[in-house]
Image (cartoon, rainbow, N blue to C red):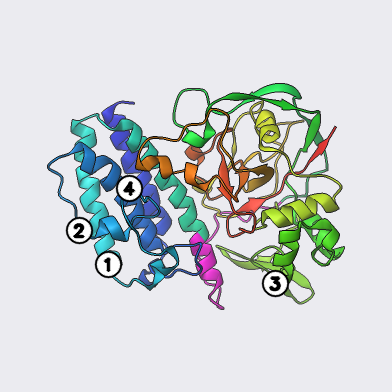
C-alpha cells in the first residue's frame, strides 16, 4: 500500500469514528454503563493512544506527546507498556474533558498524516491500528446502545434510514464440506495474528442452517418454557439464568401481551422475521439443544462461508439493527456476514503453530485465549471492510450486549 493511499485510509477511518459520534451530546461521551463497556470519550482517546504509542513514538524521535499522563490514562491492557487504570473505573474520570480528547485526536492526526505523507515506515502497525479503530467503532455503537438502554426514556441514537420488512425464511440446511479441509488466513492483505496460520482440520459430515435463527423462532423457544427448563442449559448458563432473571434476549421487554425491543432508533415491537440478537452463548446453545440441533464449530462455519461471496448488512447501512433475510445467494445460506455475529461452539484458543507477535503488541489477542467463545461473520455494527471469512471474534459466554445471534448446525 502506498503512503498516499494509507494516509487516505487513515483519514477515512478516523472520519467514520466521527460520523458514529455525530448524534451524541456531550454527556453521552462520559458514561460507563457497565464494567464491560467503556465511555465513548475513552474509545476516542484509546484509539488515538494506540497510534501515539505504537507508531509515532517509535518512528519519530522528534514527536512530542500531547500529554505525558495519557500514556497511563488511556492504556487498555498492555502491561508491557506500563500500568493502566482499573477498567470498571473509566466512567468515574471526569477529566480530561471531551473537548480536550478531541484536541488530543487532532494533535495525533496531524502528526500521523505528516508521517504517512512523508515517510512510509511502520505501515504494518498503522494498518493494525486502523483495524483496531474499526473494532472500537463497533464497540462505540454497542456501548452507546447499552448506555441509552439504562435511561428509562430510551432516547434514540439515530433514526434508521429504512424500517426493513420481510417474511421469515423457510427452514433449509446447507451441506458442509467434510473430510480434511484448510481454514485460517493465508492470503494477501491484513488479518489479525489469531487468524493464522492456515492449517488442516478434519470435519465429520455436517450441515449448517441456511438462515439465522429469527425472533419468531426464538419466541417459540421462550413460549415452550425454554428459560425455565434446565435440561437445555449448560450448568454455568443455568446458574446465570436464575441469578440474573433472564427470560428473553437483552433489550426485550413485555408490553401489553407482546414483546417489544429497544433499538438504537427507538423502542418498537419485536419483528418475528428479523434475526434474533443480543443473546449470549449460553442462550444460543440452549436454543440449539431445544431445536434438536447444535451450534457450528468455527471450522465448519468458515468452510461453508469460504464457498460464498462476502456480502451483508454492515455499519455503513446506518440502520444499526439486523434486518430480515434476503435470498442474495439462491440456494445458498443467507446473512453469513453482517447483521449479527454468530456464536460457534468453539472455545477461543490458538491455532496449531500459532505464535503471538513480539513485544507489547503480542498482548493484542494471545492473552485472551481462555474462557472465551468464538463468534463468526460480523454484525450490523461492523464496518464492511473489517469482515472476512477467517475473522475470529471472541467474547465470554455470558456476554450479550454485542449484536450476537444464532446459526444452527447438525451432524449429517
Residue 340, given in percent of the width and then of the height, sits at: 63, 48
For residue 237, side relative to residue 12 (left or right)? right
- Residue position marked by numbered label 4 in the rendering: 50
The alpha-carbon separation of the residues under discs 4 and 3 comes to 38 Å
The alpha-carbon separation of the residues under discs 2 and 1 comes to 10 Å
Which residue is at a point 31% across and 53% down the rendered structure image? Answer: 82
Q: Are marks 2 and 1 in contact (CB under 8 Å)?
A: yes
- Label 4's element? helix
Q: Quadrant of the C terminus?
A: top right
Q: On screen, 83 above or below 207?
A: below
Magenta-highlighted residues? 143-165
Residue 149, given in percent of the width and then of the height, sits at: 56, 70
The alpha-carbon separation of the residues under discs 2 and 3 comes to 44 Å
Please tell me whether residue 174 belongs to the stretch shown in magenta: no
- Residue position marked by numbered label 3 in the rendering: 243
Question: Which of the labelled discs sits on residue 96, or is there none?
Answer: 1
The alpha-carbon separation of the residues under discs 1 and 3 comes to 37 Å
Which residue is at a point 68% across and 22% down the rendered structure image? Answer: 181
Q: Residues within 10 Å of mark 4 (few under 14, many from 20)?
A: many
Q: On screen, 287 above or below 5?
A: below
- Residue position marked by numbered label 2 in the rendering: 67
Q: Residues within 10 Å of mark 3 (few under 14, many from 20)?
A: few
The alpha-carbon separation of the residues under discs 2 and 4 comes to 14 Å
Nearer the observer: mark 1 or 3; the answer is: 3
Nearest the viewer among 218 and 187 is: 187
Nearer the observer: mark 2 or 3; the answer is: 3
Q: Residues within 10 Å of mark 2 (few under 14, many from 20)?
A: few
Return the disc, 2 or 3, that comes first in the chain's sequence. Answer: 2
Q: Are marks 2 and 3 in contact (CB under 8 Å)?
A: no
Which residue is at a point 47% across and 34% down the rendered structure image? Answer: 193
The alpha-carbon separation of the residues under discs 1 and 4 comes to 17 Å
Amino acid at each position: 500500500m502506498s503512503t498516499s493511499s494509507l494516509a487516505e485510509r487513515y483519514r477515512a477511518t478516523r472520519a467514520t469514528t466521527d460520523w458514529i459520534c455525530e448524534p451524541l451530546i456531550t454527556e453521552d461521551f462520559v458514561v460507563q454503563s457497565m464494567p464491560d463497556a467503556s465511555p465513548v470519550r475513552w474509545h476516542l482517546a484509546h484509539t488515538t493512544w494506540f497510534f501515539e504509542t505504537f507508531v509515532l513514538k517509535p518512528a519519530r524521535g522528534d514527536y512530542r506527546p500531547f500529554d505525558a499522563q495519557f500514556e497511563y490514562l488511556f492504556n487498555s491492557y498492555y502491561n508491557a507498556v506500563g500500568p493502566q487504570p482499573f477498567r470498571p473505573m473509566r466512567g468515574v474520570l471526569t477529566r480530561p474533558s471531551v473537548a480536550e480528547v478531541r484536541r488530543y485526536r487532532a494533535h495525533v492526526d496531524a502528526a500521523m498524516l505528516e508521517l504517512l505523507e512523508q515517510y512510509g515506515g511502520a505501515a504494518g502497525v498503522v494498518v493494525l491500528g486502523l483495524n483496531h479503530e474499526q473494532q472500537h467503532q463497533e464497540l462505540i455503537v454497542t456501548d452507546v446502545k447499552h448506555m441509552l438502554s439504562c435511561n428509562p426514556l430510551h432516547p434514540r441514537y439515530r433514526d434508521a434510514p429504512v424500517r426493513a420488512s420481510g417474511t421469515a425464511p423457510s427452514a433449509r440446511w446447507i451441506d458442509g464440506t467434510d473430510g480434511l479441509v484448510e481454514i485460517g488466513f493465508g492470503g494477501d492483505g491484513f488479518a489479525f495474528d489469531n487468524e493464522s496460520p492456515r492449517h488442516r482440520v478434519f470435519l465429520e459430515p455436517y450441515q449448517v442452517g441456511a438462515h439465522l435463527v429469527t425472533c419468531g423462532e426464538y419466541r417459540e423457544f421462550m413460549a415452550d418454557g425454554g428459560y425455565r427448563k434446565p435440561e437445555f442449559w449448560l450448568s454455568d448458563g443455568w446458574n446465570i439464568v436464575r441469578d440474573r432473571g433472564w427470560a428473553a434476549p437483552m433489550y426485550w421487554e413485555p408490553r401489553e401481551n407482546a414483546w417489544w425491543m429497544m433499538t438504537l432508533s427507538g423502542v418498537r415491537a419485536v419483528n418475528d422475521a428479523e434475526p434474533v440478537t443480543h443473546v449470549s452463548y449460553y442462550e444460543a446453545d440452549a436454543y440449539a439443544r431445544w431445536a434438536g440441533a447444535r451450534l457450528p464449530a468455527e471450522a465448519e462455519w468458515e468452510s461453508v462461508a469460504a464457498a460464498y461471496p462476502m456480502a451483508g448488512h454492515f455499519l455503513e447501512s446506518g440502520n444499526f439493527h439486523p434486518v430480515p433475510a434476503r435470498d442474495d445467494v439462491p440456494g445458498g445460506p443467507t446473512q453469513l456476514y453482517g447483521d449479527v455475529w454468530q456464536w460457534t461452539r468453539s472455545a477461543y484458543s490458538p491455532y496449531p503453530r500459532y505464535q503471538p507477535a513480539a513485544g507489547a503488541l503480542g498482548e493484542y489477542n494471545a492473552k485472551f485465549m481462555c474462557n472465551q467463545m468464538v463468534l463468526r461473520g460480523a454484525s450490523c455494527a461492523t464496518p464492511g471492510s473489517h469482515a472476512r471469512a477467517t475473522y475470529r471474534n471472541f467474547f465470554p459466554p455470558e456476554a450479550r450486549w454485542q449484536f450476537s445471534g444464532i446459526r444452527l448446525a447438525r451432524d449429517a
